[in-house]
């Protein structure tokens, strides 16, 4: 069979067409921005092949420069020496000054810090408008809810200075906080929860902030829902004194019905029966009837269930409570979803201490541990060991007043340690039980 090959004709390799090469990149229109700074953002350069896509990326990059307002072109000229690219830039005005007029309650220095711009920077009209909003927000934080800021100069590309005119109003403070419609909690209890309230002697603190009042509405809603008032509605009325200096907030509360727990069930439990888990709960129906829902008690039950699993080595078991609403108003069921995971024993125990404390200190720490390699992991014993270590003077560094960070015991599964070993991590820096 004849062999088929490539015949060498002896012809020289094709010569690069000089017309495909960039001969020069010309920048026009710049007076304050150095040419080398502009060209540092351009990948189209003399001696390189001309690529329209790269040139378009260069133009986009120039548009992103803080000093550039507009880019014109590019213009392409083909010559015998190659391609000449011409780019024209229009620079932004440079700020000669930033001034504030009408401010009495807040100093120029504080306002300049809030503005975040200074003399000599490029003028950004969009940024000036954002600064206006930031100054108004600052005044609201200081208790001036109706202060308005006007931009006198700085909204035009031709302006070289920025002037803000500030129309300050009367500073407001909270005089009184009242509640209507509450029966489950006293006024004093609810007043302790809100953040917008009178200051000390009505002088220190107590600035009126409308956004804080809105957050207080949500805080009260969360409180009522935690007690089972899932249909509660809370509004607020705000009234000002005649001189505008004082604010009174009244929260209008429609508590609605308080939900009760009709039934409790478990999903995913295999190691323990539902009856065993049920006996640990505080929030459950009993001979006295259906209990009122209480989120704090429900969360305590979640912790009790996790501790039960953790006491037998199921340290990565997950327990989540899921309230389920029923068609019957005022009643819910609680479902505890459980992922039991695997059972673990104590493997290697590593001790890591910041600083050079030697073997004696390490042994002292191990002696305060109630778990040893081979023992079934018990999260309760881990917590007890942490408390013993924290109450000792081992971590005080000789100064009980500066104990440093409290000791922490970290449990890591074998597969995580294997990954760390493969990645070259130092196991001595990762306490493992």
Image (tube, rainbow, N blue to C red):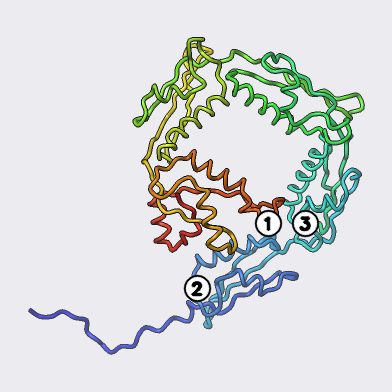
Task: Quadrant for the N terminus, please.
Answer: bottom left
At horizontal 91% and vertical 24% (from top left) the residue drawn is: 242
Tag 3 residue:
117
Q: Give the CA distance from mark 2 to mark 3.
A: 39 Å
Q: In the rendered image of this protein, does residue 227 appear above or below residue 29?
A: above
Q: Position of residue 403 (x, y in %)?
A: 66, 51
Q: Which residue is mark 1?
A: 398
Q: Position of residue 368 (x, y in %)?
A: 53, 48
| Residue in front for this viewpoint, 136 or 300 | 300
Q: Position of residue 133 (x, y in %)?
A: 76, 43
Task: Label 1: state its secondary structure.
Answer: loop
Contact (Cβ within 8 Å) of mark 2 with mark 3: no
Q: SS for tag 2?
A: loop
Between marks 2 and 3 in the image, the one whose residue lies nearer the viewer: 3
Q: For label 2, count other residues whose C-alpha is less than 10 Å away and answer few (under 14), some (14-19) or many (20+).
A: many
Q: Are marks 3 and 1 in contact (CB under 8 Å)?
A: no
Tell which of 381 and 140 is nearer to you.
381
Q: Which of the two discs, 3 and 1, labels the residue nearer the N terminus?
A: 3
With 177 as the anchor, is 331 left or right in this view? left
2 or 3: tag closer to the N-terminus: 2
Measured in 3D between alpha carbons, the distance from the residue under mark 1 to the one under mark 2, in whole angstroms, is 69 Å
């Amino acid at each position: 069979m004849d062999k088929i090959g490539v015949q060498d004709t002896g012809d020289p390799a094709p010569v690069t067409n000089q017309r495909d090469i960039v001969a020069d990149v010309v920048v026009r229109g710049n007076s304050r921005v150095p040419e080398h700074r502009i060209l540092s953002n351009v990948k189209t350069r003399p001696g390189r092949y001309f690529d329209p896509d790269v040139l378009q990326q260069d133009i986009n990059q120039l548009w992103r420069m803080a000093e550039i307002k507009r880019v014109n072109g590019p213009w392409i000229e083909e010559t015998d020496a190659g391609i000449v690219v011409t780019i024209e830039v229009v620079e932004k005005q440079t700020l000669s000054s930033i001034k504030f007029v009408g401010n009495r309650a807040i100093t120029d220095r504080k306002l300049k810090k809030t503005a975040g711009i200074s003399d000599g920077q490029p003028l950004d009209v969009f940024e000036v408008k954002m600064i206006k909003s930031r100054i108004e927000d600052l005044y609201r934080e200081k208790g001036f809810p109706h202060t308005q800021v006007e931009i006198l100069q700085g909204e035009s590309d031709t302006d070289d200075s920025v002037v803000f005119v500030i129309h300050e109003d009367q500073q407001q403070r909270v005089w009184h906080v009242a509640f209507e419609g509450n029966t489950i909690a006293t006024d004093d209890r609810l007043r302790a929860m809100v953040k917008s309230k009178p200051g000390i002697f009505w002088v220190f603190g107590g600035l009126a902030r409308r956004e804080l009042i809105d957050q207080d509405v949500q805080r009260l809603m969360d409180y009522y829902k935690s007690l089972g008032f899932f249909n509660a509605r809370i509004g607020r009325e705000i009234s000002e004194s005649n001189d505008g200096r004082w604010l009174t907030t009244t929260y209008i509360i429609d508590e609605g019905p308080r939900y009760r727990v009709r039934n409790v069930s478990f999903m995913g439990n295999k190691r323990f029966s539902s009856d065993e888990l049920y006996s640990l709960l505080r929030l459950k129906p009993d001979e006295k009837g259906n209990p009122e829902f209480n989120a704090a008690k429900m969360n305590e039950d979640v912790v009790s269930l996790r501790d039960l699993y953790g006491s037998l080595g199921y340290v990565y078991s997950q327990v989540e409570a899921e309230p389920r609403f029923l068609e019957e108003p005022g009643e819910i069921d609680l479902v505890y979803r459980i992922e039991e995971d695997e059972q673990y024993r104590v493997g290697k125990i590593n001790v890591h201490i910041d600083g050079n404390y030697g073997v004696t200190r390490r042994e002292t720490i191990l002696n305060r541990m109630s778990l040893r390699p081979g023992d079934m992991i018990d999260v309760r014993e881990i917590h007890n060991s942490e408390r013993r270590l924290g109450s000792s003077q081992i971590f005080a560094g000789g100064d009980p007043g500066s104990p440093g960070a409290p000791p922490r015991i970290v449990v890591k599964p074998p597969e995580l340690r294997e990954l760390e070993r493969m990645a070259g991590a130092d196991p001595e820096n990762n306490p493992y039980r």
